[in-house]
Amino acid sequence: QVQLVESGGGLVQAGGSLRLSCAASGSIFSINAMGWYRQAPGKQRELVAFIPTGGRTNYANSVKGRFTASRDNAKNTVYLQMNSLKPEDTAVYYCHADLQVVAGTLEVWGQGTLVTVSS
């Protein structure tokens, strides 16, 4: 079964840092494009960072200069380094990936990991 498994969320004080990981498992060849999203209580899910198959990563204006998304293709894992965290960054963070599998491409969501930033 192909899935994305997230880890790294938790409670941190404002100004602190966290690193989220998202590992793809199962019978996959590679991760094509992927993105990090977040959903705060009472709000819609929003895109935080988008890593295309090739080219530059795009970030939401609210996280530019503070968050960095990266990928390790050998491990089929993507990361989200979050620095200078603010209380408004509190949300459930999800990764989403377009995976290359035997049958073609498959879009998969992670289960989400909660990030809580205290003031």
Image: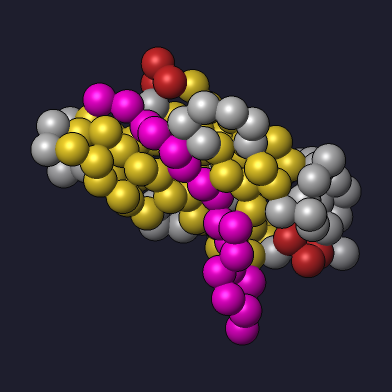
Residue 82 versus residue 65: which sits nearer the camera?
A: 65
Counting labels gives 0
Relative vertical location of residue 51 with respect to residue 95 in this rendering, above or below: above
Give the residue drawn at x 63%, y 36%: 57
Left or right side of 100 for 1: left
Look at the image and tell me whether residue 13 can be seen.
no
- In x, y percent, where is residue 28? 23, 30
Give the residue drawn at x 83%, y 40%: 65
Residue extending farthest to the top is: 74
The C terminus lies in quadrant: bottom right
Q: Which residues are magenta?
A: 29-47
Question: Is residue 98 one of those drawn in magenta?
Answer: no
Question: Is residue 35 one of those drawn in magenta?
Answer: yes
Residue 80 location, quadrant: top right
Residue extending farthest to the front is: 55
Residue 17 versus residue 37: which sits nearer the camera?
A: 37
Which coloring applies here?
secondary structure
Give the residue drawn at x 25%, y 25%: 29
Residue 88 location, quadrant: bottom right
- In x, y percent, where is residue 85? 80, 51
The N terminus lies in quadrant: top left
Give the residue drawn at x 24%, y 41%: 105
- In x, y percent, where is residue 87? 80, 64
Relative vertical location of residue 119 with respect to residue 15 in this rendering, above or below: below
Residue 53 versus residue 96: which sits nearer the camera?
A: 53
Residue 76 location, quadrant: top left
Residue 79 versus residue 34: which sits nearer the camera?
A: 34
- In x, y percent, where is residue 106? 25, 46
Q: Main secondary structure of the magenta part?
A: strand
Left or right side of 17 for 42: left
Residue extending farthest to the left is: 103
Look at the image and tell me whether residue 102 can be seen.
yes
